[in-house]
Amino acid sequence: MLKIIYTKMFIKSFFVQALWNYERLQNIGFLFVIKPFLDNAYPDKNERREALMRHTGFFNTHPYMANIIIAITANTEAKMAKNETIAADVNLVKSSMAGPLAAIGDSFFWGTLRPLAAFICVFMVILFSQISEFASLDYGIVIPIYFLIIYNTIHIPLRYWFMFSGFKLDRESIALLSKFEFKYLWEMLRYTVLAVIIVSIILYFKVFGFGPVNKNFFGASFPDALIYGAVLVLSFILGRFSATFMVYMIVLACIAMAYLGM
Amino acid sequence: MIIENIFVLAFIAAWCSADVTAFGQFMIYRPIFCAPLIGFLTGDVTSGLWLGMIAEMVWINAVPLGVAVPIDISLISMLSTFWVNKYFPGIQEAAIWSLVFAIPFAYLYKEIDIAGRKFNIKIMHWVERGVQKDKESRINLGIFFGLFLFVLRLYIFYLIAMGFIGILYQMIYLQFPAFMVAGFKKAWFLLPVLGFGAILHNFRNIKVPFLESRKKC
């Protein structure tokens, strides 16, 4: 019975941000996910209403890490139903974990895993752009599929693990998380990302900066790699500017160069 | 072209964009996935891959963190891929113009999205009142209503952008003088380099443990 409820909650956790709002952010999403558990824990209508109302307050964390908080909160609610704890403890569990877990989620999933999966595919795009026969056929569609596979084969099992370890180990799951050397894992993954980027840049310069298609800027007199190198350095230095601003500046600079006959 | 009907394409695009917040976060909203998908459905994966690659790298930091609502990069990449494949398939210059033309619409949609999230406050209060009155079904209804509105506003936006604004995109491109078109061609090769620079800037603070430990010594 509980396994069915946990599975239901796991599926529902994909909707945790569906009613994201500026006042209390993910509160209704949290309520939506934890509801099957509360239905089971509180058969009495009045007690259930009280429990549901407890979770209408502000809640915000990383959407993947929400699973672990929901599971631990559900365990605390189970204790609450048996009068083993007080209501304030339930909210304390939620509020104290949301921030630190959001930081872990943001830096690991958004800041490391996603760029890694994306840049592997960027590298593949540059690699395949050399093979015109490949590009002319529709086989290029495999590249974005790889992106989804790389990302989701890590993300979905982790999300599942967050929820079920939260249920099984309760607050110990946080201790287990903290035991992992995340810092080193991130550093290693970030090195991998950096290595993929550097290889992609080298390949890009080789193909488009020195290769047969490098007659866009200087004709045959100089390789286009010169201008690519300058733009690479400038965009690295001026990285603080808005990406949109930089895109428009590059396009305008290209138009100006074309006007001047370069 | 596998799918020509913009009603179907707008629906697919709306579900891809909904992945950013409303459902799942499976990363189907990332340009590296959704632009080639639209490219595949409209008959040219290559331009979708290239535009997706540029958008993915340039807007590497465009992820929703906390209460921040970034511009919708899936909208930029999918609209630009759709426009170029519909009106000027395989023309790199037109692809860059479509990218440039799509960016303001992403900012416009951001404002619509913020208004939608403000409207969600009303739904949230409606759910809360329901819970107080033992109408627990409002929790499920609120979630699905929120999701429905999210997809609906995206769908309407894509429908208008793919249809009417696409015609405007085509008309403007045909008026461009030759040097501007030549400029777009140059930008086709230069924008990925801008993306590389943006990524390197993003990863500039990476620490080398070996060097760090030596510094400590």
Image (cartoon, helix red, strand yellow):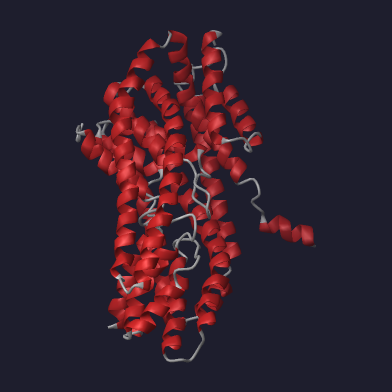
Q: Position of residue B29 (x, y in %)?
A: 38, 46
| The C terminus of chain A sits in image quarter | top right
Q: Position of residue B49 (x, y in %)?
A: 37, 36
| The N terminus of chain A sits in image quarter | bottom left
Left or right of A206 in this view: B92: left
Q: How many marks?
A: 0
**Closer to the camera, A69 or B148?**
B148
**Closer to the camera, A163 or A203?**
A163
Name above or below for residue A33 compared with residue A191.
below
Measuring 51% from the left and 12% from the top, which residue is drawn there?
A258
Name above or below for residue A103 compared with residue A235.
below
Left or right of A191 in this view: B112: left
Q: Position of residue B196 (x, y in %)?
A: 54, 37
Residue A140 visible, this orientation: no
Measuring 43% from the left and 76% from the top, which residue is drawn there?
A71
Left or right of B168 in this view: B71: right
**Closer to the camera, A50 or A243?**
A50
Q: Residue furthest right?
A: B217
Q: Position of residue B194 (x, y in %)?
A: 55, 32
Measuring 51% from the left and 22% from the top, which residue is drawn there?
A251
**Closer to the camera, A91 or B186?**
A91
Name above or below for residue B109 compared with residue B212.
above
Residue A187 visible, this orientation: yes
Q: Quadrant of residue A245?
A: top right
Left or right of A109 in this view: A187: right
